[in-house]
């Protein structure tokens, strides 16, 4: 015994045709996908590089050592 599908087959077919017809990368097809796929990783990378740079600067100048 099989259970009924969540979405009607015609509606699913319409969504598939829509998303397969867009000429962008798969991970950038939605409306807010650029925020989650590009902006958040870029912000994390920039902030981590800034913290690493600050740590290297502090270590090379001996700042923040506990005595």
Image (tube, grey):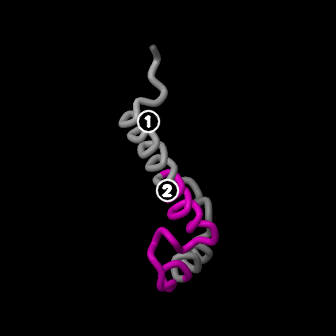
User: In the rendered image, which quarter contains the C terminus?
Assistant: top left
Name the residue tied to disc 1: 58
Question: In this view, which residue lies farthest toward the left?
Answer: 60
Q: Position of residue 22 (x, y in %)?
A: 51, 84
Above/below status of 4 relative to 29: above
**Separation of marks 1 and 2 at Cα, in angstroms:** 26 Å
Q: Main secondary structure of the magenta part?
A: helix
Marks 1 and 2: CB-CB under 8 Å? no
Above/below status of 4 relative to 65: below
Question: In this view, which residue lies farthest toward the front?
Answer: 61
- Sequence-wise, which precedes: disc 1 or disc 2? 2
Q: Residue at x 61, y 59 (%)?
A: 6
Image quadrant assignment for residue 5: bottom right
Q: Residue at x 52, y 82 (%)?
A: 17
Q: Nearer the viewer, residue 48 or 4?
A: 48
- Circle 2: element type: helix
Residue 59 visible in the snapshot = yes
Q: Which residues are magenta?
A: 18-44
Q: Position of residue 57 (x, y in %)?
A: 41, 41
Name the residue tied to disc 2: 41
Comparing labels 1 and 2, the label whose residue is closer to the camera: 1
Q: Position of residue 49 (x, y in %)?
A: 44, 49
- Circle 1: element type: helix
Which mark, by number, is residue 23? none
Q: Position of residue 50 (x, y in %)?
A: 48, 48
Q: Nearer the viewer, residue 54 or 23?
A: 54
Please rate how many residues cluster around mark 1, counting C-alpha atoms within 10 Å: few if below 14, some from 14 to 19, many from 20.
few
Q: Is residue 48 part of the magenta span, yes or no?
A: no
């Amino acid at each position: 015994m099989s259970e009924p599908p969540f979405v009607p087959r015609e509606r699913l077919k319409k969504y598939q045709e829509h998303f397969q017809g867009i000429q962008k990368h798969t991970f950038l097809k939605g409306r807010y996908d650029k925020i989650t796929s590009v902006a958040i990783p870029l912000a994390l990378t920039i902030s981590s590089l800034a913290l690493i740079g600050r740590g290297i600067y502090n270590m090379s100048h001996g700042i923040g050592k506990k005595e």
